[in-house]
Amino acid sequence: MMTRGLLITVSGASGTGKGTVCKRLLDLTPTLIYSISATTRAPREGELDGREYFFFSRDQFVEKINRNEFLEYADVYGNYYGTLRSYVDGQLADGRDVLLEIDTQGALKVQKACPEGVFIFLLPPSLEELKQRIMGRGTESPESLAKRLKSAPLEIEIGRQYDYVVVNDSVERAVDQIKSIIAAEHCRVDRSAGLFDTFKS
Ligand code: 5GP
């Protein structure tokens, strides 16, 4: 019997460093599949359609919402972002672990739809550090920056609802901890019924 892959969500307040941590995690874990999200925001310099995101117009995105093609979607700072259901389901069914790097609203929706998923909340070392990181990024408009700064403390509170919390004070340490979480989740008895079945006499 093929064991279904793990649906792993890494989430956290904007500016926590999810992107960097997930990228390093993926580099070190070639078996882990990154779920490429769809978004209506414009590509940033260096971003490619189908690599960082699938870049859709608002009309295209709404059409997919109406066809129920998203496992979750959210309006994040004025743009839509969503996880395409078909891609994720196919990979999990083939026994591959899938990584979702999504915002906190989306993560809560996935938690409702897929309670068997693994939900990891990434914390910045401090609120001050988070603010510095958001302001230092240099890619945001003043309005977007203000929204992200204002919502940070509230977004951090949402972390209490996750399964695991990892502090991103060093990328390598955070990645090590996430790798350990994934390894431990694979060993859970409730995910290993098939293993026990092979010992039945
Ligand atoms: P950015 O515009 O900086 O790439 O991403 C903004 C926020 O949207 C980040 O917190 C990112 O994790 C989140 N995000 C990216 N993809 C998705 C998605 O598919 N669903 C949801 N809910 N959030 C996403």
Image: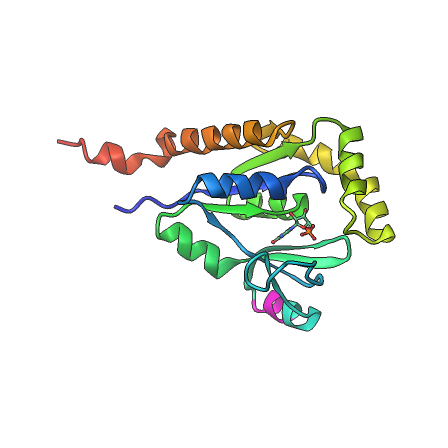
Residue found 65% across the figure and 57% down from its top: 81
In magenta segment, residue 65: yes
Q: Position of residue 16 (x, y in %)?
A: 69, 37
How many numbered circles does the render carry? 0
Q: Position of residue 183 (x, y in %)?
A: 41, 31
Identified at 63% across, 48% down, the residue is 106
Name the image quarter holding residue 166. Answer: top right
Magenta stretch encompasses residue 29? no
- The C terminus: image quadrant: top left
From this viewpoint, which residue is outermost toward the left?
201
Question: Which stretch did the figure color magenta?
Answer: 63-67
Report whether 186 appears left or right of 151: left
As drawn, is 134 to the left or to the right of 166? right
Q: Is residue 161 left or right of residue 100?
A: right
Can residue 155 be seen by looking at this rendering?
yes
Q: Main SS type for the magenta part?
A: helix
Give coordinates of residue 163: x percent, y percent: 55, 31
Decide if residue 116 is in sight here.
Answer: no
Q: Is residue 69 left or right of residue 185?
A: right
Q: Nearer the viewer, residue 57 or 20?
A: 20
User: According to the image, what is the colour scheme of the structure?
Assistant: rainbow
Q: Examine the image and state in which quarter residue 108 appears.
A: top right
Rendered residue at 60%/59% (across/down):
53
Residue 119 pos. (x, y %):
55, 37
